[in-house]
Image: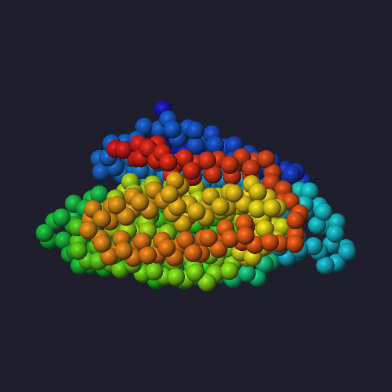
Amino acid sequence: MITAPLLEIAVLVLGMLILMIEAFAGKIDKRVLAFAAITGLAIVLLASFFLVPSSSPANVTGFWSFYAADRLAIFFKQFALLTTILVLIMMIDYAPVVSSSFVGFKEGRLPSRPEDEPRRLESRRSLVGLGEFVALPLFTCAGLMYLVSAIDFVFIFVALEVVTVSFYVLVSFTRRNPMTLEAGTKYLILSALSTAFLVYGIAWIFGSTGQTNLYRLTASLANAGADSGAALLGVVFVLVALGFKIAAVPFQIWVPDVYQGAPTPVTAYLSVGSKAAGFVVLIRVLQPFMNLPQTERLIFVIALLTLIYGNLAALPQTNLKRLLAYSSIAHAGYLLIGVLCFDVRAVIFYLVAYLLMTLLSFAVLIIVAQQTGEEISDFDGLAKRSPFLAFAMLIGMVSLAGLPFTAGFLGKFYIFYAAVLQRQIALVIVGVITVGCGFYYYLKVIRAMYWQSDSNTDPIPVNGLSRVAISALIVATICLGIYPQPILDALKH
């Protein structure tokens, strides 16, 4: 029988094999490594469906008391694997940009000197740098899988660092691009600061309760003699660290510049994978503290500020990556409403919907940006140049906005329904108003594609694998908006 830790071990071994082949296989087409990584992850994803979830993490004792293999953990292991597979497909499309950066040219530009032409042609044949670029997401995926199973603060810290260190390298990967270097520096400094808050918070919690295991912590806080004030201060510091990971206000300052400067597949991975794992950890960490009124008030304020800031800041954006960055902040606000109401199923459904519509938007952006650019105006007339890509972006945008019969609409519906049941009327009112803001800035992209004209009429090619992935995301976004039962059934305990 397959045990849960074997999945992470398999992903780590796969990542090390990719690195070894990259180092010693010579001048092979590095896309072979990408296809090998995708195939390996698909096998691990298939194996994950044969796992039998444990009844309750609270009953785990002995060495594995820091590790949960409950239904929530297994579901998000599959979530991380699927996200990584889709990101690797995007990386194949992005490979020429990475290769150009490795031989010292600006992204997407031809060499300035004639003598550099042979190096450019060689890089395009062998796609230099792609091996490391596809290996790093495998280590990130393993870290995400460990993170969603972590039920001990020490293991949370270790898993979080595995994810964060991998992202340090990925964000700065095309390092000859000044914007990428700026993004990497900002992410490194602020992430290190958030790690310091996490460790400090863990120290306060352990000092006041004598526990780092989340389930033993619940029993310790129920003890009348426990110092709940010191533990609450500790959880505030932990929230600062997790607020950085999920891009919640006021810890979101890094998001726009890092999202814009990082390689686009990495931006998509940060937006979906890191955020999803962050919310799973947040739900587990807050469980012992949700009975304290101070915790509820703090989450309420953060959710309110995140909703308002994310949506208002997105309104004037003209760069699509920056728009999606502020959009990511806004969606963190909606998810925090679900966390405040402690409706786990609503949060998880919203995260699945967010996976589909965000990766769909980024997949189209990667292909179009290499032909034109990342500005919204660069999408002018896309419906004539590539009706398929325009339709895909249309579905992504209307789902992000929350139009009926899309996954995004049902995601927002479940969140608001949970808020109404918990009498969080203020958040519902602000949430509905900000959804209206979302319609404005998402529809700007649709207007550019279908109503604006452009003199360039050259068709935009889409390779077969990307076309299949984009088509699957379109179908899933629409089907989940009409029939959400498969996801809801998967979350039943």
User: Which quarter of the rendering shows the N terminus?
Assistant: top left
Q: Viewer-proximal residue, 207 or 340?
A: 340
Rendered location of residue 97, percent (x, y): 70, 57
Reply above or below: 290 against 64: below
Q: Quadrant of residue 458?
A: bottom right
Side of 346 relative to 42 (left or right): left
- Looking at the rendered image, the quarter that the C terminus falls into is top left
Q: How is the image coloured?
A: rainbow
Point out residue 440 in the picture as x, y percentages from the top left corner. Answer: 49, 64
Q: Is residue 299 above or below residue 276?
A: below
Residue 59 visible, this orientation: yes
Residue sitting at x 62%, y 60%? 451
Outermost front residue: 451
Task: State the residue in front, 58 or 314.
Answer: 314
Q: Residue at x 64, y 42 (%)?
A: 467
How many numbered discs sit on the rendered protein? 0
User: Furthest-top residue in view?
Assistant: 1
Task: Quadrant for residue 337, please give it.
Answer: bottom left
Q: Residue 147, percent across and down?
A: 41, 50
Residue at the outermost left position: 224
Q: Which residue is pictured at 44% across the width and 46% down the height?
A: 405
In this image, 371 relative to 439: left or right?
A: right
Can you give x and y, in whole percent of width and height, for residue 470 in the image? 59, 44
Residue at position x 40%, y 64% from top?
A: 434
In this picture, is 101 found above or below 385?
below
